Image (spheres, rainbow, N blue to C red):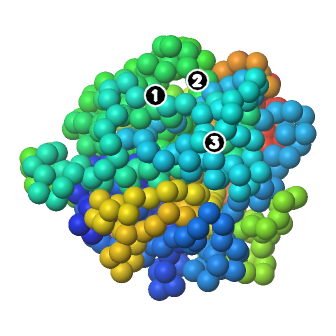
Amino acid sequence: MSFASKRKFGAAAAVIGVSGIIAALAASAGGSPSRAAALPVPHPTVGTVNDYAQVSASETPPTQAQCASVGRRCFNPASTRAAYNLSPLYQQGLDGSGMTIAIVDSYGSDTIAHDLHVYNQTWGLPPMCGEEGVTCSAGMPTFSQLSLQGSPATKAPPSSSNGTGQEDKSAWALEVSLDVETAHAIAPGANILLVHTPTAETLGVQGFPQMMAAEDYVVQHHLAQVISQSFASAEDAFGSAQSLQNLRYAFQHAAANGVTVLGSSGDGGSANTKKTPVGQGGSTIPVPTVEWPASDPLVTGVGGTYLCTDATATNGRIVDSVNPPVNCQNNPGQAEVGWIDSGGGFSHVFAKPTFQSTLPAGSTFTGSMRGVPDIALQASARTGALVYITLPNDGNSGLICPGGAPCSTGWYDIGGTSLSCPQWAGLVAIAAQSKGHGLGPINQALYTLAANPTTYANDFFDVTVGNNQADPSVTGYTASPGWDPVTGLGTPNAANLIPDLVAAVG
């Protein structure tokens, strides 16, 4: 999950190292208008947040009036599809059919089969073989789970535990619902394989090795054409650059096997947390750095935006001028604004790859190191997506809402680059269907298309306003024409980009 920042949440929290990328739920009215609150997932401790709330406590999704009452515009599959021009692809029969998206998360979710069913029934999406209450039939997309290293119950350890200090496992269930439901919303014909590991990340000491081993298994056994990673850690948080390099083998094998790998760029803006090694105090400091895996040249890094279009629209990209969140009000007429927490900047490990040597006019690329992100999509919880989840009502081992009480089952408005990444994975699955096989690494193709002024104007929505200085003590970056360290090349005009991407991939 990736976050606006890395924080501690009530008694359920623990000091853990890497992002698992969810940003926020609908916040209380007193919340900051420019920041998304974070959920309790494994992160280092930097403070406390109690500025989040679910929007509905039933299977009935909230109205836009309910969302607006807490300063949100809540997007559903139809309005997100309208914002990124997907309808022409669906009309051509392109929906990801025959392709598989592997989604990698810690722990998994005990209720995802049920939650997926509620989500699909609510929005009229095609059912999946493997969701609760569905009879499988020929041609139906499948939802399945893979647990290679054991599958512990998604329940937090007791407060008296002397174990590794891992935080509430059930909190990852919200990440699972976000990833699975929104990927299916974009590519309703694609299969989804939920890959879960029994550990959260602790800066490469634990978590990352297991996740990379699981991804490599998926690649080597040809189980998916696309991998979505909603987890990340600051490059500088690893013990050494070599310890990070030692984890890249899964991406190298993915490239050789025609598998596209995407990674959330993080929710710390230009600042990320550097944590002292386990056993050395666990202190954390914000540093100007980017997050890996998104910084890896073999991975397509996905940043985020405020999506300022009409969340009730189902046909076309209509700027919302009636009741937009404050960040959109501050930029009237803009369909998208760079998200304050969109992870971006320049790598301290990887040199500038050749695919970033030619950029669109006006790009703000500086230096000789890899720039992050490559592309973007909606990410702010202020203009986030509705996700359904069943939560356990077991006190501190569940998700704690403002006031200290456990959150309950229902609908949440969620953001973060955990939202942008699985939706982009859905777009890649659609492209792979059109191609007839996996695309492999797509960065060279994306930048080649963007280098042509005509193609760039047709295929991308260039996000030119906003910044990602999430931490006032760390210099941020400003969105600009062309590529920038907030939104990369911009967001997709899918109906134009997907066929051009298919043609451009070698």
| Residue at x 51%, y 28% (from the top left corner) | 298
Amino acid found under the numbered disc labelled 2: Ala
Q: Which quadrant: the C terminus?
A: top right
Q: Nearer the viewer, residue 93 or 261?
A: 93
332 left or right, relative to 416: right
Q: CA distance from mark 1 to mark 3?
A: 20 Å
The image shows residue 293, relative to residue 411, as above or below, that is: above
Residue beneath the point at 71% across and 68% down: 308
Q: Are marks 1 and 3 in contact (CB under 8 Å)?
A: no
Where residue 133 is drawn, which disc sits there?
A: 3
Amino acid of disc 1: Leu
Report the number of numbered marks. Answer: 3
Give the residue at mark 1: 146
Pick whichever of labels 2 and 3 is earlier in the sequence.
3
Residue drawn where x is 65% and y is 53% of the image? 119
**Residue 326 image offset from top left, x and y in percent:** 62, 80
Q: CA distance from mark 2 to mark 3?
A: 25 Å
Crowdedness of circle 3 by 10 Å Cα count: few (<14), some, many (20+)? few
Q: Which residue is mark 2?
A: 224
Q: In the image, residue 137 lies at what x, y percent?
A: 74, 27
- Is residue 167 shown to the viewer in this render? yes
Front residue of 300 and 153: 153
